[in-house]
Structures are given as C-alpha cells and as structure tokens.
Amino acid sequence: MAPGFVAHELALSELSDPEGLVRAATGPVAPYATVEVEVARGAAAVSAGLATGDDEHVLATWSAGTSRVTISIRRAGRTRVVRRRKVALAAPFRFAFVLCENQVTALADTGAGWRPLLTERAKVKALVDLRREDVLAAHVYAWGGDSLGGVRAGLFGMTGLRDPHLVQHADGTPYVRDGRMFLTWTAAGTGSFQQAHWTVWSFDPADTPGMRLEAQLFSRRGGLVVGDHAGQLVRDGDRWLVATSSWGDFEPGTIHVRHTTSSADLLAGVHVLDTVPTSMPTGHGTWDPALTRVGDRWHLAYVESRSQRPFTFHPALAATTSADWTDGLTAVARMTVLGQCEGPILATVDDAIWLLASDGRDRCFPVFDLTGHRVGRLDAPYGTNIPHPQLVPDPAGGWLLVTFDGTPFDRAMLGYGGHGDVVVLHSS
C-alpha cells in the first residue's frame, strides 16, 4: 500500500461477516491498486480485489479448506480461475491483492513482511484489460469473507525505487518548497517495466531517511492509463514541464520520450497526464530525458537505444534555441562507444553544467561536457544494477549522491524489474 494513499480503511468494529463481496464507494484511477485484509483466527476464506456493480470481478482468494490461493476473473456471468496454488497458511495473517498494470499478485504477511504467493498477467489481460480507462472506471475496491480483522484499500506503493531525478527549475537549480527538495522515482511493481509507475518524493537534505511519498503520476494515451516513468519534472515560470519515457506499454522497438505541460500541483496527490511523443533527433529508441536551460538554449540529455533485443544503449545530447524545448531539437553528441550506459543527469557544479551517466559495463559514472566530450568520471562507489548518479547539493556543504541498487523483491517468482533499494552517499 502506498503510504498516504489509502482510500478506504475499516477496523474490526466496522466489518461484518458478509456472505458475498463488499464493494467500496470508489476504485483506483489507474491500474495500480492494493486491497489488504487482516485474516483473523478461524477464518474459512477471504477475497480481495476489484469488482463492478454488475457482478464482474478480478479477485485473489484464499481458502482454508483447500489450502489454495487463486486468482479469478468473472466476466459475462462466468468465473475463470487463471492461476491457483496450494499454500500452507494459518490465520492470523494478512492477505493482499495487488494490481500493477494487468498483472495480479496475491501476497501474504505472516509476520516477516509481505511475500508473493502467486502472480498472473497474460491470462488476466486476455480476459480483461484494466488499462482501459472505461473498464477500470467500472471497478471499485472489493473484499469478502468471514473473520476479517480489518481492511485497507488504495493505490499500490512499490517493491523498490529507481531512476531518481531531481525536480528542478529550468536553470537547473533545485525546486524547494517548505525547506524540502523533491525527486521523481520509478516505483517498481510486481513485475517488469510495464508494472512500474512514476512517483514524486520530498526530502530534507539533512534527513534523507525521512524521504516522503507526495504524488503518484500516471499517463493517459490511446484510451489507456499506463505507468510511464523514468523522466523529469522541470518548473518553468508558472507551469510544469513533464518529460517521461514510454515504459508503461513497452515492447522492443516502441520505447520513446513523451512530454506534456501542466499547471496542476504535480508534487501532491494523484495525476493522470495526457502526454504526446517528443520529436527526438534520432530514429532509435529513447528514454531517460534530462532537461536544463542555459540562457536561451535548452539542453536535453537522453538515452539512445539502437536495439532492445538485445538491449544496447548509450547517452546522447540534443539542444534547441526554441522557447519550447520540444521544438527544433538537433543532435549534439552520441556516445556510441558505450553499450550499457543510461541514467543521464545534467548537474551544475562550480557554475558549469555537466552530463553524468552510469556505465554498467565499466562500473563507473562517466562525465561529459555539453559538447559530448568525456572529461572524466565521478569519484564515487558504484553499486549493483545500473545506478543513476543524481547529484544533489547539500545546503550544509558538499554533495549528496542519491541513487539505487539492484536489490530484488522475490525475483524467483516475479522476475526482473521489482528491484531498487535507495542508496544515499555524501561527499567526503
């Protein structure tokens, strides 16, 4: 459950023992949802998920009698079990339904934290596409069963965080509100790229462990709501410039940078953004946009990828003198000698702007000037995965390096993508 984004919370005194499903008044605005139920001693069965008003549902269910956990879809009067597994569970414990894109996962917490019990995407999507805004809008949070000790429902949180990017003004200075800076993070989900989504967190540079989730951002395109991520928010006058990457429906050959502008407060609450493709100066795949204006010239760093099967990618630079950063972008440099290098960051150090990136092959953070010439590397430890080198000036002196690592959340069941512990370093 995303901290601060619980839509419904009911204690034991507010629950009865319903024979059927209880439908909440609301559902999620994006297909990233959680329903948690406390299973009390003596329970026979519990269900959690999403349901419509005309007897359709997407549910995770546990039965004490059969010792089975199932994922079921009900459509047109017929219920289909798309995944089942025998699991030894003894009440009391916590049981959860999680939806990330079209992937449904059942989880349990018996006292040592959440662990996935089973998961399914392909068979769910074949029966119902919950990315469709009209389909999702018909569903509300739902639960049922006997001996429930409590229920919480709301937006999904994360299995890890990665791709940090400082929220900044157009000139590259950090955006500060009430003494706190902000970072966008990719919130890893219960699966790969499509199961992740984009979030905004605030932090006090003097207390980085107090990082706090403030906003969740989703993308609307083609009638679908998806979890595009790996981008940046830039404050330009009285509006937000939004640049993101189309990971929300990723297939090899389709990945690209997208953009929009917004006057809403994107640093708080939940937002579904209408984005359009950015006209990039390349015919290859692109992601990880990073944007800064110097004088009358916008500089855009990004990843250029000639192939996503297998993956090969390198940093690139573009620029424009247009007032609109998306207009007239021309290529400045491509670092094609690098084959596993991403996470470009435009950082201002000693009144100069540098492009920092993360080289997964040489395990270092190369540094380039704005012509694309390599000038050295960042002297910092390099962890696991491909950690992005987000430099943050410390008002007390020196620099913070805010990044992530490859720590996974049950990769054996969920595969690659549910990783990312936050790592913070400080200059010595």
Image (cartoon, helix red, strand yellow):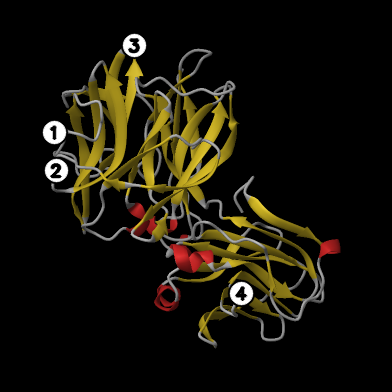
Distance CA(mark 4)–CA(mark 3):
60 Å
Q: Is residue 399 left or right of residue 259?
A: right
Q: Earlier in the sequence, mark 4 or mark 3?
A: 4
Q: Residue 350 shows which numbered tag?
A: 3
Distance CA(mark 1)–CA(mark 2):
8 Å
Q: Nearer the viewer, mark 4 or mark 1?
A: 4
Q: Earlier in the sequence, mark 2 or mark 3?
A: 2
Tell me which amino acid carries mark 1. Ala
Q: Which residue is mark 4?
A: 53
Residue in the foreground of this view, choosing between 32 and 68:
32
> Are discs 1 and 2 less than 8 Å apart at CB?
yes
Q: Residue 126, how many percent across, how many down?
A: 40, 77
Label 2 Cα neighbours within 10 Å, binned few <14 / some 14-19 / many ≥20:
some
Distance CA(mark 4)–CA(mark 2):
48 Å
Tell me which amino acid carries mark 2. Thr
Q: Which residue is mark 2?
A: 282
- The local secondary structure at tag 1 comes to strand
Quarter of the image for residue 147 reads bottom right
- The local secondary structure at tag 2 comes to loop
- The local secondary structure at tag 4 comes to loop
Can residue 157 be seen?
yes
Q: Residue 131, how many percent across, how many down?
A: 43, 63
Q: Nearer the viewer, mark 3 or mark 1?
A: 1
Q: Residue at x 34, y 43 (%)?
A: 244
Q: Is residue 408 above or below residue 144?
A: above
Quarter of the image for residue 378 reads top left
Q: Which residue is mark 1?
A: 331
Q: Residue at x 40, y 39 (%)?
A: 383
Q: Is residue 201 above or below residue 354?
A: below
